Amino acid sequence: MASSAGAMKTLVLAAAVVLQLLLLHGGIVTSAGGNFYQDVDITWGDGRGKILNNGQLLTLSMDRSSGSGFQSKAQYLYGRFDMQLKLVPGNSAGTVTTFYLSSQGSSHDEIDFEFLGNVSGEPYTVHTNVYTQGKGGREQQFRVWFDPTADFHAYSVLWNPAHIVFYVDGVPIREFRRRNDGAVPFPTSQPMRVYASVWDAEEWATQGGRVRTDWSKAPFVASYKGYAAAGCTAPDVASCARSNGAWMSQELDSAAQEQLRRAQAKYMIYNYCTDKYRFPQGPPPECSSPAN
């Protein structure tokens, strides 16, 4: 018994040393491996969220009574986050399906993918937004080059100290860069969880609220699979700032920058930076300011 206790004590001390080294030399880097039982908690919906196929598939549904949603067990400060989604098919008007990151509180940070439903035969709107210290209003919207209800497609967020990049099937569609003068806040200090949901937003989601939800088509079901998250889960900001994960220094090379330019030219349908009605005095500073 004494030798077993001694061995256990040695293992505990060794684990503590490894943990301390990780904190001192690059943070704690963890990865979620795509098993929803292990990686997320269904947090609302009273049974409308279901984990299937031994943890490989998660469905969220909405009816007149409620939508549903889940959140990651871990929270991250910087990382790369991937999810494959198949959106609500048919008449999805009034529905919003989401995949996003968020911290908590009135001054929260948030990185949004929202998918705004439409009547049958009309395209979805991919709605993106970035909140910093509680302030959003940085919407860019896109159509996609495929039917997002027919099969699963990959939606990804890269978040590091230099920029935030939104990807669809590996193609960058949006970049939000950190300003070099600090005049516009950038998410650097608040760990975020990954969230997803399906909820009713018929007052605004489809054609500005002109088309309402057809509840005879309920339940509305979206499907999620292939969740992958690689990020820093260290308990303090300084450790995560020293993280050595590949995502910490990832930039858009010239080919990716060209993909971004083409995607925005062809598929962007709204850009807050060019909305003169909202910003008659000129666009917000992050729209034109040089970045790091």
Image (cartoon, rainbow, N blue to C red):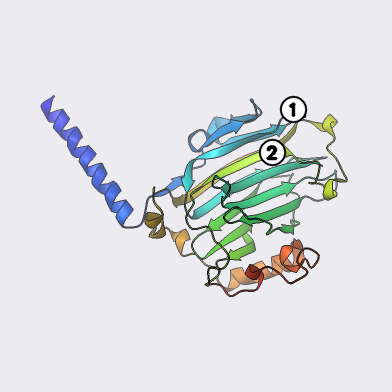
Residue depicted at x 79% and y 68%: 276
Seen in the picture, residue 46 relative to 287 is either above or below; the reply is above
Most extreme residue toward the right, as rendered? Answer: 210
Q: Which residue is mark 2?
A: 198
Horizontal placement of 202 versus 24: left or right?
Answer: right
Label 2 Cα crowd, 10 Å radius (few <14 / some 14-19 / many 20+): many
Q: Secondary structure at mark 2?
A: strand
Seen in the picture, residue 64 relative to 25 is either above or below; the reply is above
**Residue 148, position in %: x, y?**
73, 48
**Residue 212, position in %: x, y?**
85, 40
Horizontal placement of 168 versus 253: left or right?
Answer: right
Image-quadrant location for residue 176: bottom right
Q: Amino acid at mark 1?
A: Ser
Horizontal placement of 148 versus 74: left or right?
Answer: right
Most extreme residue toward the left, as rendered? Answer: 2
Q: Earlier in the sequence, mark 1 or mark 2?
A: 1
**Residue 198, position in %: x, y?**
69, 38
Query: What number of labels is visible?
Result: 2
Residue depicted at x 20% and y 33%: 8
Residue 112 visible in the current orientation: yes
Residue depicted at x 14% and y 33%: 6
Q: CA distance from mark 1 to mark 2?
A: 12 Å
Label 1–label 2 contact, CB within 8 A: no
Image-quadrant location for residue 136: bottom right
Q: Secondary structure at mark 1?
A: loop
Q: Which residue is mark 1?
A: 65
Query: Looking at the rendered structure, which numbered label has been put on residue 16?
Result: none
* Towards the viewer: 125 or 283: 283
Q: Amino acid at mark 2?
A: Val
**Residue 5, position in %: x, y?**
16, 29
Label 1 Cα crowd, 10 Å radius (few <14 / some 14-19 / many 20+): few
